[in-house]
Each structure stands twice: as C-alpha cells, then as structure tokens.
C-alpha cells in the first residue's frame, strides 16, 4: 500500500519502512516494532505506561484447529523496550467467555487470576490488568497509551464535551473507572453504541486507538494525539499564558546547579527516615515554568490524575518553602528549616491512608515525599534506585504537561482521593510489589571510587555496582573513565575527572555524585602510584607526589565526604586502599612505604573521630597485585624486581610463592575485601584487612 505520511508537529513519526519490511508479515514482530517506537516518545507514554496488542490466527496444539490469539504486553513491562519475552499470548475466545463468570466490580481481583486459564503461549509473561480492555475489543491491533495531551483532555473539566469538540463523532468517551474487567465491558459497550469511531478517551486515564494493521494503528494513534496537542496549543495561544503566569524568576543555570548539589544530601537524608533513597534532579524549562508559576500553590496539592503517574510520584509533591536565594552553606540551619515540612508531609500522608484505607488494605508504605519542588531552582525525586527516581521525575513532568493542557482547555481535575488510594493500595499492585526481586546488599547506596579508570579501582567499582550500589568513577584520565563507565548500565554509574591532589577537583567530583544520585555513602580511596627507590635515589619530587596522592588526597577526600555524610545523617563508609608495605619494612621503599603507613594510621584516627556519626573507616591492604594492576605498568615493577634480585617476568610467580596460600592476588580479590567492609562487617571500624594470600610479617596482630 502507498503510505501518505503527514507532517506531525507534536509527536515524532518514527516508522521506518525498511525496518518494517524486513519483518514481513510477522504480525507479532510488527506489533513489537510499533510498541518500541511509540515508547520512544515520552510525550506519548512514559516508562512502563500504556499497553499494546495484536491478534493473530494460530493453530491450536490440542485441537489442530485455527484459533484467534491475542498478544499483549505482560504485567510490569515497558512498551519502549518490549520484546517477545515480555508479552502474553491468550486465546481470545476464552478471554471473552470470562464474561459468563464475571461477578461484578467486587470480582475484579479474582478475574485477574482467571486470565491464566486463557493462556495460549506457555512462555507468556503474566497477563496485565489491561488484558480484557484489549481482548473485548474486536480490532487486530490496539494501542492503549497515556499521551500528555490526551490525559489533559481526559483530566479537563467537561472532558466528554471537550472530546466532542476536538474529534466530533469519531471518538468515544468513557468516564473514569479503575482498570479491570468491567472497564473492558464499558469499552465494548461504547464501541457498540458508537460504531465507526477511531478510538476512545478514558476519563482521567488515557487513550485507546486501533487499526487493521500495525501501521494503521500507529498512524491512528499519532493522528489522534496530534489533534489533541494542536487543540491545546491553540488554547494556550489564545490564553496568552499558562499556570497563571510567572510568580518568581529562576536563578541562573550555574546557580541552580550549585544550589541543587548543596541541597540534595540534606533532602536525601530527610527522605530516608524510613528507607535510604537515591535522588534525581531536573531543571528543565517545562519544570521551571510550572514551579515558578502563580498556580503552583493551587495545582500541586491537587495531585495527579493518571493512575500511572501517582503510583510512581505519590499523590502530591512537597513544595519547599525555601527562598531560591537562601544561603545553604550552614547545613544545620537549613535542615532545621526543612524538617517541619517533611514531618507535616508524613503526617498528612498517614492521615490520607487512615481516612481511605479498606479493611484489607496493605500496611501504609513509606510516608516520605517522592517529588520535591524548589521554586526558582528545580525539581528533585527520591526513590529506591536511580531508575525509579528518574522515572518518577519523568512521570511528574508528564503530570505537569497534563495540568498545563487541562488548564488551557477548561480547568484541571484530579482523581478523588478515595479513587487514588484504591489504585495506590490495590491488592494486585501490592502483590506485584511483593513479587519484586529482593534488593541487593548495597542497593540504595552511592559509592565514589578514586583511581577507577582501571586496575583495582575499576574492579572495586564493578563489585560494588554488582552488589546494587550506584557508583561514581573518578580518575585523572578521562579517556580511561569513558571506557570504564561503558561497562555499567545507564542508571548505575557516572564519572568525574578528579585529581586527588587538588581540593577543588575533589569538590567537583562530590558535586557530580550529589547531582547524579543525591549524595554519597561509600568512599574508596584507590587512586595511587608506586615509586620504588633506595634512599639516596628518592627525590623530593618523588616524596611529594606520593604524599600528595596517597596521604593528602585521602585527607581531603575524607574531609569533604564527612561533610556530605553529616548532611545526610545516614552514616557511611570510608575505605583506604593501602598496602602491606605500610606494615612491613622492606628495601628501596622509603617514600611509598611511609605514605602507605600514613594512610593506615590516618584511617585509625578517622575511625576514632567519626564513630559518633556512624561513619566507619577501614583499610584494605593488598600485596602483590600484579595482574591487572596499573602500578605494575611502569617503573615500580622494575624497582621491585631489582630489590628481589629477579626479572620482571618472574614477579607474578615470586609473589604467589611467597604468601602462605601460594595464591596469585587479583584486583577482584581487593574488591571483595572492600565489599566485606561495607556490606558484611557492619560493626567494624578502624580495622585493617589484609588481602595478600597470607603474609606472616604483615599480620596486624
């Protein structure tokens, strides 16, 4: 067929004929392709939001008869990243026959369990709550999306009338109802009463559109969203302003970033009264327009409308009553200013729970805010991990766009609080939460590792990230950092070029950690170098660089880390990667050995001073880490070989044979030592852990 592609202004047309043609007539593959490109535009649907489906004719393995099968995104999936493994395949006829046993609104939860009796593909993902909404409609391809523009229409006062004004008789409208089997029946009824419509607007919820082919469905969805977007844009132009106009001005960009970096550890600590949280910050134009407006005070407490929004953002944000120009350098004063607002938020959330809970409602969840607004500066979000915090932030931006559109059309309406509660504390949603994998030992923690461009530092970053931590890799070589950070998932790691001999460079690295994740919990000083020379050959320059990198660097890293950890009030860990050479006297080692001994004793002194803050300070002592260690790439190897009267090539075997276990020590072994300190030995401080295969002359006691 000839495709006539119109120019879209408010959505992205992403269909690629070459890609789709390679899929041939594979309707499931085309449905997955459509899903992915729809999910690539956050104006159309956000992460995890919406659902898509297609229906095909398959051969029943039991009867050998042809049957219709519906393929649909499974529970908890994301259309933007959807694959065959994430969908469910169900017998359409069996699903429709469930109408014969449906017992009404009080039977909704039982119906979800019955979806499993309709499974065709035994490799199916668990069917989602939206399954009957797609299955009871006759169309081959269906999109259920949450576009900002459509939810604005759905959440506007007089939504049904607005729907008629935009699309005439070509779109149906169904009032708000919680997703479930009965909503599927309502969609079926709407279609029967309005034959020939191209889609249905769900009040306060979203959009259903369809088509005979995947491409037709895609185009129908885009065209409907484009029409709503254009309608809203015209209304905004006619009104001349949004959100009642600007109330306060934003700080300049650099000042906003500085304020956010200063404030995030404090907000993180306040948000972590029940569970430690990871943060995210944005100061986009969309956010600033809303948070600086006259209508912020009226709209923010109303809460969001779309269920997908408030499930991730909580029912409403916390708006800080803090002047954008406020001095944030005195953390004690700022915390005392902010604490009452957090206490009030928790109190109001508990009241919301108490007023709306059912007899069988799950226990109240963490009462701290997810979204925090700082007028003039930006918006923060805090959740159990970086991805969840970022997605919550994105969802609230969607909510802002919805409020913006609805206010331009007529006025914004949010879900009644009881409806919102019933979604947030839905037993099926609670069951989904209970099925989530157990969190890893370092989940919710942020680790900053120096010297992480390779060698021991990179191995430590790998280990901590594998155990759930967010990691900030630092090194003096950006090219090494760029390569190193590629090995992590996008939401797991960040990096900062850092020269540990310069306090400003260290401050910039911590600033990056605060902006990226909200603060820091674990600091590992792994950056180093080794110089092996006899006394008479050791120069002042040799001495100074060893002292500056190993000792002064550790001092400044600890000093700045402690300031952040105290703002958070969550305790923390500081780990010094020292050396056996700080304990054992050996030849040709005056500069290096002295520096390592200084690191070790500094750690003991810090442990003694910081115990009251629940900041634990420990040392990991490697020895003979030749394979994969950066310090063995230079003159150090030659110096040690000379000291022992052997060749460089003989060093690995020499070091392995001299320890009690006769083991080669790898960077990963040092990483395990760090992990033990921060995740297992949680009542240990001031300790030295030797990871050297057993060197009797290095025994601490």
Image (tube, rainbow, N blue to C red):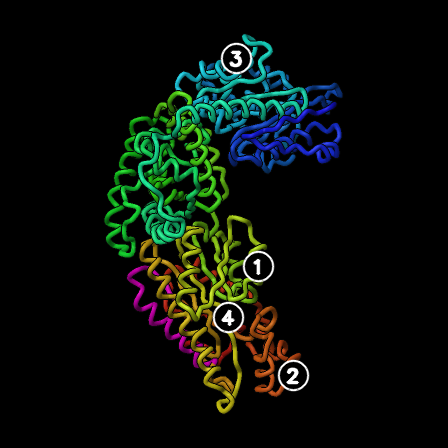
| Marks 4/3: CA–CA distance | 74 Å
- Quick one: 555 or 74, which is closer to the camera? 555
Q: Residues within 10 Å of mark 3 (few under 14, many from 20)?
A: few
Label 1: element kind: helix
Task: Answer above or below: position of 597 versus 323.
Answer: below
Residue sitting nearer the eye, 125 or 395: 395
Asked if one can make out residue 614 in the rendered structure from this viewpoint, the answer is yes
Q: Which mark, by number, is residue 484?
A: 1
Q: Which residues are magenta?
A: 592-617
- Quadrant of res 350: top left
Q: Is residue 635 magenta?
A: no
Disc 3 + disc 1, Cβ < 8 Å: no
What is the x, y in percent for residue 39? 57, 34
Q: Residue at x 50, y 70 (%)?
A: 691
N-terminal-most mark, 3 or 1: 3
Whether pointer 2 and pointer 3 mark residues with C-beta atoms closer than 8 Å, the reply is no
Nearer the observer, 318 or 254: 254
Query: Residue 647: which disc?
Result: 2
Q: In which image quadrant can residue 423 be found?
A: top left
Residue denoted by label 4: 691
Residue 459 image point, x, y percent: 55, 62
The residues tagged by marks 2 and 4 sit, at their Cα atoms, a distance apart of 24 Å
Query: Which residue sits at x=27%, y=50%?
Result: 326
Label 2 sits on a secondary structure element that is: loop
Q: Are marks 4 and 3 in contact (CB under 8 Å)?
A: no
Indicate left or right for 202 with 292 as reference.
right
| Relative image position of residue 435 (x, y in whole percent) | 49, 37
Q: Earlier in the sequence, mark 1 or mark 2?
A: 1
Q: Which is in the foreground here, disc 3 or disc 1?
A: 3
Dot 1 crowding, Cα within 10 Å, few <14, some 14–19, many 20+: many
């Amino acid at each position: 067929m000839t495709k006539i592609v119109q120019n879209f202004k408010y959505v992205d047309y992403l269909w690629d004929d070459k890609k789709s043609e390679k899929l041939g007539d594979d309707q499931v593959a085309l449905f997955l392709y459509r899903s992915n490109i729809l999910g690539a535009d956050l104006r159309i649907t956000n992460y995890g939001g919406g659902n898509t489906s297609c229906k095909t004719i398959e051969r029943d393995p039991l009867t050998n008869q042809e049957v219709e099968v519906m393929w649909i995104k499974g529970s908890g999936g994301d259309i933007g990243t959807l694959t065959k493994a994430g969908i469910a395949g169900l017998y359409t006829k069996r699903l429709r026959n469930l109408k014969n046993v449906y017992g009404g609104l009080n039977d909704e939860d039982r119906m979800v369990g019955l979806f499993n009796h309709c499974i065709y593909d035994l490799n199916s993902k668990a069917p989602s709550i939206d399954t009957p909404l797609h299955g009871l409609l006759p169309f081959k391809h269906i999109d259920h999306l949450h576009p900002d523009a459509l939810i604005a229409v759905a959440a506007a006062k007089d939504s049904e009338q607005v729907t008629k004004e935009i699309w005439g008789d070509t779109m149906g409208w169904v009032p708000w109802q919680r997703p479930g089997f009965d909503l599927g029946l309502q969609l079926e009824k709407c279609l029967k009463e309005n034959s020939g419509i191209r889609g249905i607007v769900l009040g306060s919820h979203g959009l259903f559109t369809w088509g005979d082919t995947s491409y037709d469905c895609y185009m129908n969805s885009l065209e409907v969203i484009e029409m709503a977007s254009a309608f809203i844009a015209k209304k905004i132009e006619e009104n001349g302003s949004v959100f009642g106009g600007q109330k306060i001005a934003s700080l300049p960009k650099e000042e906003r970033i500085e304020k956010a970096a200063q404030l995030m550890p404090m907000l993180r600590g306040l948000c972590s009264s029940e569970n430690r949280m990871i943060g995210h910050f944005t100061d986009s134009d969309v956010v600033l327009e809303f948070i600086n407006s006259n209508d912020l005070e009226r709209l923010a407490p109303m809460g969001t409308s779309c269920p997908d929004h408030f499930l991730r953002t909580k029912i409403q944000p916390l708006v800080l009553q803090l002047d954008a120009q406020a001095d944030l350098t005195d953390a004690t004063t700022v915390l005392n200013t902010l604490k009452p607002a957090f206490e009030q938020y928790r109190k109001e959330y508990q009241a919301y729970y108490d007023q709306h809970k059912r007899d069988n409602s799950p226990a109240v969840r963490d009462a701290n805010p997810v979204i925090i607004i700082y007028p003039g500066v930006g918006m923060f979000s805090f959740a159990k991990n970086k991805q969840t915090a970022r997605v919550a932030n994105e969802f609230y931006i969607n909510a802002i766009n919805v409020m913006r559109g609805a206010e331009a059309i007529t006025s914004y309406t949010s879900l009644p609080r009881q409806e919102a509660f019933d979604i947030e504390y839905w037993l099926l949603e609670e069951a989904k939460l209970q099925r989530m994998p157990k969190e890893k030992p370092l989940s919710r923690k942020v680790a900053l590792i120096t010297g992480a461009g390779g060698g021991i530092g990179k191995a430590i970053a790998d280990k901590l990230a594998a155990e759930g931590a967010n990691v900030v890799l630092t090194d003096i070589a950006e090219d090494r950092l760029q390569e190193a950070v590629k090995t992590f998932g996008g939401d797991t790691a960040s990096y900062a070029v850092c020269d540990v001999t310069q306090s400003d460079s260290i401050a910039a690295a911590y600033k990056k950690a605060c902006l990226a994740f909200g603060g820091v919990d674990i600091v590992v000083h792994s950056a180093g170098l080794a110089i092996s020379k006899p006394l008479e050959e050791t120069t002042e320059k040799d001495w100074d660089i060893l002292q500056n990198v190993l000792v002064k660097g550790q001092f400044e890293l600890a000093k700045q880390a402690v300031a952040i950890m105290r703002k958070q009030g969550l305790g923390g860990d500081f780990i010094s990667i020292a050396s056996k050479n700080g304990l054992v006297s050996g030849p040709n080692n005056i500069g290096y050995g002295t520096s390592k001994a200084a690191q070790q004793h500094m750690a003991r002194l810090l442990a003694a001073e910081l115990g009251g803050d629940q900041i634990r300070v420990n040392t990991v002592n490697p020895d003979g880490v030749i394979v994969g260690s950066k310090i063995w790439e230079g003159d150090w190897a030659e110096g040690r070989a000379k000291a022992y009267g052997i060749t460089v090539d003989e060093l690995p075997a020499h070091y392995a044979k001299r320890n009690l276990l006769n083991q080669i020590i790898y960077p990963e072994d040092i990483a395990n030592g760090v992990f033990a300190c921060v995740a297992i030995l949680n009542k240990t401080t001031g300790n030295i852990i030797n990871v050297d295969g057993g060197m009797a002359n290095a025994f601490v006691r």
